[in-house]
């Protein structure tokens, strides 16, 4: 079964790094990308996704409000927040808002991505 992933990230370099890490998985992966939250919400309403990687700082949405807006329209899809800013208490707040994980972009690596895929897909 193909794991369908939506990456919502406005920085092309960060998107490329994440896409590369995702494509290293042995699982069949399909990656779609959006640069803004509004088109991402529209896409989520039309298409099923297994997982969303969501940047918290987008041109059309910022902070945990970004997660709240996404969860309102797609409450069942697992969401991993990505941020470049180290903010005290962010991971706990994100978890309370329903995020699967909160990762700092500078700590993103293949093992973290694989661990996340294992959590949503099992060890198949």
Image (cartoon, rainbow, N blue to C red):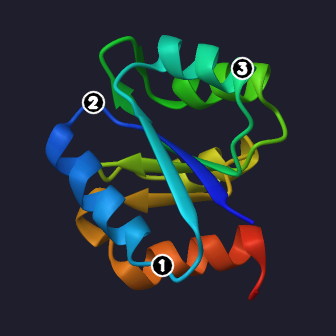
Task: Find numbered disc 3 in the image and state the secondary structure of the residue it sits on.
Answer: helix
Q: Position of residue 33 (x, y in %)?
A: 41, 36
Name above or below for residue 95 compared with residue 40: below
Residue situated in front as seen by the camera: 120 or 64? 120
Q: In the visual, does 94 lie left or right of 102? A: right
Q: What residue would you read off at disc 2?
A: 10
From this viewpoint, is residue 55 visible?
Answer: no
Name above or below for residue 116 compared with residue 12: below
Instruction: Please say if the residues under marks 3 and 2 sit with CB atoms less than 8 Å apart.
Output: no
Q: What residue would you read off at disc 1?
A: 25
Q: Residues within 10 Å of mark 2 (few under 14, many from 20)?
A: some
Q: What residue would you read off at disc 3?
A: 46
From this viewpoint, is residue 108 visible?
Answer: yes
Q: In the visual, does 114 lie left or right of 111? A: right
Q: How many marks?
A: 3
Task: Find numbered disc 1 in the image and state the secondary structure of the residue it sits on.
Answer: loop
Q: For marks 3 and 2, give the CA distance.
A: 21 Å
């Amino acid at each position: 079964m193909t794991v369908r992933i939506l990456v919502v990230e406005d920085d092309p370099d960060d998107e490329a790094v994440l896409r590369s890490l995702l494509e290293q998985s042995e699982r069949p992966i399909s990656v779609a990308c959006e640069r803004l939250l509004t088109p991402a919400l529209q896409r989520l309403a039309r298409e099923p996704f297994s997982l969303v990687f969501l940047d918290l700082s987008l041109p059309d949405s910022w902070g945990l409000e970004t997660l709240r807006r996404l969860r309102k329209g797609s409450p069942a899809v697992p969401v991993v927040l990505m941020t470049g800013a180290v903010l005290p208490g962010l991971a706990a707040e994100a978890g309370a808002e329903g995020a699967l994980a909160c990762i700092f972009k500078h700590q993103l690596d293949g093992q973290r991505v694989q661990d996340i895929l294992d959590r949503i897909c099992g060890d198949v």
